[in-house]
């Protein structure tokens, strides 16, 4: 008989404080950004703060938070949706994604 204890770690769910912290820091960034910044620079800064906050705190899974700029950049008027989505569908990115999927499938 083995006397090793197995610790069951609950699956990570959504953590609410960091989820709320991201938009709050974004609003704070909007009001604290220098007035001479254009709306594009201000919007990009806000997207960066929100994404980094959720990424570092892991408020939501990292792959989901990495898709946040595709939604927020058009929402804050930095660029249109087609321009924001263009970088997520680059052919080299899809090639790497396919390679990682194959590697994961072979590993299992």
Image: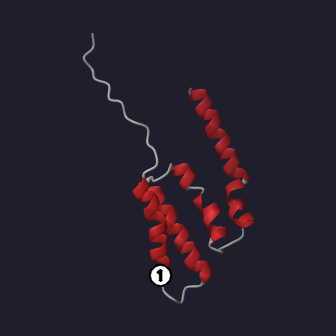
Q: Position of residue 95 (x, y in %)?
A: 69, 45
Furthest residue toward left? 3
Whether residue 1 sits left or right of residue 16 in the image: it is left
Which is more toward the observer, 108 or 30?
30
Whether residue 8 sits left or right of residue 22 in the image: it is left
> Which secondary structure, mark 1?
helix
Q: Position of residue 78 (x, y in %)?
A: 65, 74
Q: Which quarter shows the C terminus?
A: top right
Q: Position of residue 31 (x, y in %)?
A: 47, 81
- Decide: few, some or many residues near mark 1? Use Cα within 10 Å; few <14, some 14-19, many ≥20: few
Considering only vertical position in the picture, is 28 above or below 104?
below
Considering only vertical position in the picture, is 75 above or below 33?
above
The colour scheme of the drawn protein is secondary structure
Q: Which residue is mark 1?
A: 31
Considering only vertical position in the picture, is 63 above or below 87?
above
Q: Residue at x 75, y 64 (%)?
A: 82
Q: Position of residue 48 (x, y in %)?
A: 52, 67
Q: Residue at x 45, y 52 (%)?
A: 58
Residue 7 falls in image quadrant: top left
């Amino acid at each position: 008989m083995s006397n090793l204890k197995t610790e069951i770690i609950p699956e990570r769910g959504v953590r609410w404080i960091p989820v709320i912290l991201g938009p709050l820091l974004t609003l704070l960034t909007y009001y604290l950004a220098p007035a001479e910044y254009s709306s594009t620079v201000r919007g990009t800064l806000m997207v960066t703060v929100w994404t980094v906050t959720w990424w570092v705190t892991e408020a939501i899974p990292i792959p989901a938070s990495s898709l946040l700029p595709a939604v927020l950049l058009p929402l804050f008027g930095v660029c249109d949706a087609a321009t924001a989505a263009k970088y997520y569908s680059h052919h080299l990115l899809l090639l790497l994604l396919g390679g990682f999927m194959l590697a994961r499938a072979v590993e299992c």
